[in-house]
Amino acid sequence: MNLTEFEALLHAQSYGEIVTVEKPVGYLMGLHQHTFDACALITAGEITISVAGVETRYGVGDIFRLPAGTPHLESAVALGVTYRVGRRQIAMS
């Protein structure tokens, strides 16, 4: 899937904010959560997302989805990562 197709998918699924995120080699983020649903396409490097103790690695061309409020860890230690991500705000109670 190319970036144009990915962004069309995000718009069709009501992701209002679309941004590019870059994280450097050595990037680590401790346990946290977001107030938005995320859907991202990896464009360079790789990232590991850990949810409930299960680690999943995403590389170039992979898409990951993370529902709002999901506690998770992130790391891009070896290569760093760049991804295009859609964010869909969710009302948290």
Image: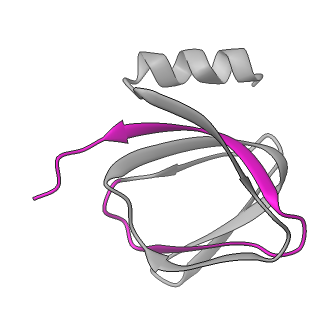
Locate residue 23 relative to residue 85 in the image: left or right. Answer: right
Q: What residue lies at 43% left-to-right and 74% top-to-bottom?
A: 32
Left or right of residue 21: residue 79:
right
Q: Which residue lies furthest to the right in this view?
A: 79
Q: Where is residue 63 in the image (x, y as percent from the top left)?
A: 65, 43
Tell which of 47 and 80 is nearer to you.
Answer: 80
Looking at the picture, does residue 46 appear above or below residue 54? Answer: above
At x 35%, y 48%, the residue is 36
When the figure is inspected, residue 33 is found, relative to residue 31, above or below; the finding is above
What residue is shown at x 38% (from left), y 53% (from top)?
67
Q: Which residue is drawn at 79% across and 56% down?
A: 81
Residue 26 point in image, percent of width and height: 81, 77
Instruction: Give above or below for 6 relative to 62.
Output: above
Q: Magenta stretch: give its range.
A: 68-93
Q: How many labels does the image show?
A: 0
Indicate whether 60 appears above or below 27: above
Quarter of the image with the N terminus in it:
top right
> Residue 45: x and y, percent?
86, 55
Colour treatment of the image: one colour
Place residue 87 in its image quadrant. Answer: top left
User: Which quadrant: the C terminus?
Assistant: bottom left
Would you identify the image quadrant in which residue 75 lies? bottom right
Q: Is residue 1 left or right of residue 20?
A: right
Picture quarter containing residue 92? Answer: bottom left
Q: Position of residue 59 (x, y in %)?
A: 81, 53
Question: Within the magenta stretch, is there residue 64?
Answer: no
